[in-house]
Image (spheres, rainbow, N blue to C red):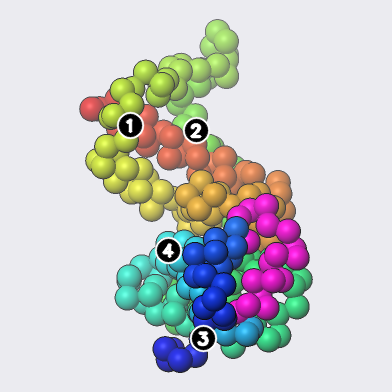
Amino acid sequence: MSDGMFRSEDPADGAGVQRAAITGSMSETTAQANDWHLIELLRRGDEAAFIVLIDSYHKAMLRLATIFVTRPMVAEEVVQETWMAVLEGLPRFEGRSSLKTWIFRILTNRAKTRAIREGRSVPFASFADAQSDDDESAVDPDRFRPPGAKWAGGWVSFPAIWEAQPEERALTMETRAYLEKAIEALPPNQREIITLRDVEGWSSEETCSLLGISEGNQRVLLHRARSKVRNALEKYFTEK
């Protein structure tokens, strides 16, 4: 990507004021009109707009790409290819989805293609795969009292109350690293959901739109992912 591909609009406007205005258009509550304003800036080659776009989404795109391709270098290539595709596709963007969803859809499509080329499975290549584990238990069945026992179906041992953990302990780098490993160990479809919802802060509506799944399926996968991560952290805190 050449340095001259983008140009600043009017320096007299003040870079700080322009950056603040563009950044405001990136929030979750952005009106559709502001989204189109950003698109028009990008189409005119506004350098500040493109820099803010990269600052806002690049890290999230890289995290999502690594769900499909494991090598960091390949994930970086997928993200760079996505940005080039965004620049090439902006003139044809019709606004059928938000700009954010459109960008991430390009990313996931390219990441899936790269993953298939490298012989890896794809999380949402067919969402039927995501529904194939309908009988999967979100919580280990051994945690509940068996049929015929007193209070059958009740907890054998209640989940640990994390609020009792010292705040500084919950925020240590070791705990964060363990949390990341717990997420990485999830099945790809659950990992994708929890990454979008709990790591990147996407709304349920945005997630369903990006992945092309129903609210019900999204809710089930997210519940399973959160339960597994919680169980892993509970085990970690118990052993510490």
- Dots 2, 4 in contact, CB < 8 A: no
- Dots 2, 1 in contact, CB < 8 A: no
> Looking at the image, which is closer to me, 106 or 41?
41
- Dots 4, 3 in contact, CB < 8 A: no
Query: Up-down: is 146 above or below 198?
Result: above
Magenta span? 25-42
Q: Quadrant of the N terminus?
A: bottom left
Amino acid tagged 2: Val
Amino acid tagged 1: Ala
Looking at the rendered image, the disc whose residue lies closer to the viewer, 2 or 4, is 4
Residue 131 visible? The answer is no
**Mark 1 element type:** helix
Residue 156 visible? The answer is yes
Report how far apart the C-alphas of labels 2 and 4 lie in the structure: 32 Å
Residue topped by disc 4: 59
Q: Residue at x 51, y 86 (%)?
A: 6
Q: Earlier in the sequence, mark 3 or mark 1?
A: 3
Report how far apart the C-alphas of labels 4 and 1 lie in the structure: 24 Å
Magenta: main secondary structure: helix
Q: Residue 164 colored magenta?
A: no
Looking at the rendered image, the disc whose residue lies closer to the viewer, 3 or 1, is 3
Q: Earlier in the sequence, mark 4 or mark 3?
A: 3
